[in-house]
Image (spheres, grey):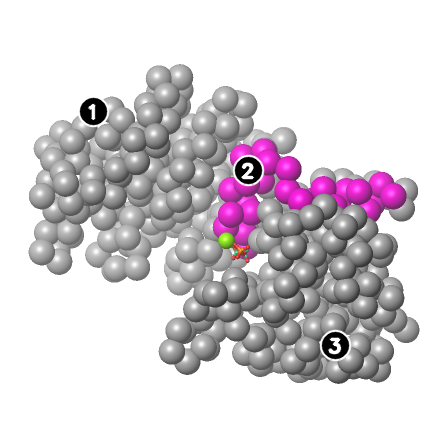
Amino acid sequence: MKATAIRVDINSPLDPKSGKILDEWRIKEAVKSLKKYEGVPVVVMAHQGRPGGEDFTSLVEHARVLRKYLEQTEFVEDIIGPTARVRIKELNEGEILLLDNVRFLSEELLEAPPEVLATTHFVQRLAPLFETFINDAFATAHRGQTSLVGFSEVLPSYAGPLMEKELSSLNKVLLNPELPVIFLIGGAKAGTKLELINHLLNNKKTEKVLASGFIGHFFLKAKGIRLGEATEKRLKNGELLNLAKTILKQHGNAIEVPIDVAVNKKGERTEIQVQSLPSEYEILDIGSETIDSYNSIIQSAGTICINGPAGYFEEKAFAHGTEQLITTIAESRAFSVIGGGHLSVVAMKLGYYDRIDHVSTGGGATLAYLAGEELPVIEALRRAYQRDGREFLF
Ligand code: 3PG
Ligand code: MG
């Protein structure tokens, strides 16, 4: 029996000193998928970091963690060489072989259309050893890289279980949501997130946007409120400020901004009203009145999607806003989706992970999907389904 190849995303935060994996979340999600292929020989392909980055390493640690949950996991320090190919051919039913970081191959990062990537040594050497290709790497669906879109050109290909759950959950938010739909947008990546808000409101995908984090700061500043240099030094991008102003002009009624904030006064959380700004201290969270007001909007929602923390949640004193919002979302009756890695950590810590309908494993991929972008991996899968006369339901 030939092996089934599965591309997963187990790109994980690493401790820069020890190289140990700091958060096993994506690996655990991959384990749930891998369990569905028990009884067949499975070859797992994945990446870690980017060339030149501190976290660009071998997957040997990932294999160690995988083995905790699936003891039949083996690792080979090779991708397309003879060692890997011999092991793939010998693989028995029920065995799992993790290949090394696919980004070690320069061909992984070639910029070319899928049909060209299908002619790489990478695909040409491995594809004949595989029965089918499963793409389960939703978190990398916004990349058109060889392992992500090349194999589906030449092999019968399927969306994996996590890919299906990601797409059906995000589609439920975007295409047939229970109304009203509320988006909570916080955190950094202000450019991407302001574009997302603009897209959602222009396309009537949400009734309300509750802004916090840097996004909240940009909107406050766009309303002419002076926040103080300690906060504004991080908001120097004039283009983003103009975008925030445009969004407010067109959709002002749909955007909720903080009415009070928490600043870091010499290490202490101190709440102040937005009317009393500017402050010489940096704003690191939303305040209690904002939390109450956002909570009551959340309680009336039919669908909730939250992306990005409300404040500097890494520090206990400023995690309050984020934790309160996640708690209300978990306890609400609405269909709820968390996008992005930081908030999954918070939901897990609070014991609410399983009370959120879907915790997306994607960062950039989730934002791009919500913003209506065509993702190369989804396109490649759609083409493969059509080629084989199967219906692609996403
Ligand atoms: C991620 O963590 O965002 C994904 O694994 C994609 O990684 P990339 O941004 O390096 O392509
Ligand atoms: Mg990324």
| Residue underneath mark 1 | 224
Residues drawn in magenta: 361-387
In the current view of this chain or complex, which residue is farthest to the top? 250
Of residues 385 and 142, the one nearer the viewer is 142
Residue type indicated by callout 1: Gly
Is the CB atom of the residue marked by disc 3 within 8 angstroms of ligand 1's nearest atom?
no
Return the residue at label 3: 81
Of pointers 1 and 3, the one earlier in the residue sequence: 3
Q: Nearer the viewer, mark 1 or mark 3?
A: 3
Q: Earlier in the sequence, mark 3 or mark 2?
A: 3
Q: Is residue 237 visible?
A: yes
Tell me how far mark 1 sits from mark 3, CA to CA: 60 Å
Q: Position of residue 180 (x, y in %)?
A: 49, 28
Q: Are marks 3 and 2 in contact (CB under 8 Å)?
A: no
Mark 1 surroundings: few (<14), some (14-19) or many (≥20) residues within 10 A: few
- Give the residue number, with chain letter if any, for mark 2: 370
Residue 347, visible in the rendered structure:
no
Task: Tell me which amino acid carries mark 2.
Answer: Leu
Q: Secondary structure at mark 3?
A: loop
User: Regarding mark 1 in the picture, which secondary structure is present there?
Assistant: loop
> Residue at point 61% right, 69% down?
104
Disc 2 CB within 8 Å of nearest ligand 1 atom = no
> Viewed as shown, does residue 332 lie left or right of 64?
left
Residue 266, x across and y down, in percent: 9, 56
Q: Secondary structure at mark 2?
A: helix
> Where does residue 68 sit, x and y in percent of width and height?
59, 80
Q: Nearer the viewer, mark 2 or mark 1?
A: 1
Locate the C terminus and report the quarter of the image it occupies: top right
Q: Counting other residues with Cα less than 10 Å from the Cα at mark 3, is it few (<14), some (14-19), or many (20 or more)? A: few
Residue at image x 40%, y 37%? 191
Cα gap from disc 2 to disc 1, whole angstroms: 29 Å
Identity of the amino acid at label 3? Gly
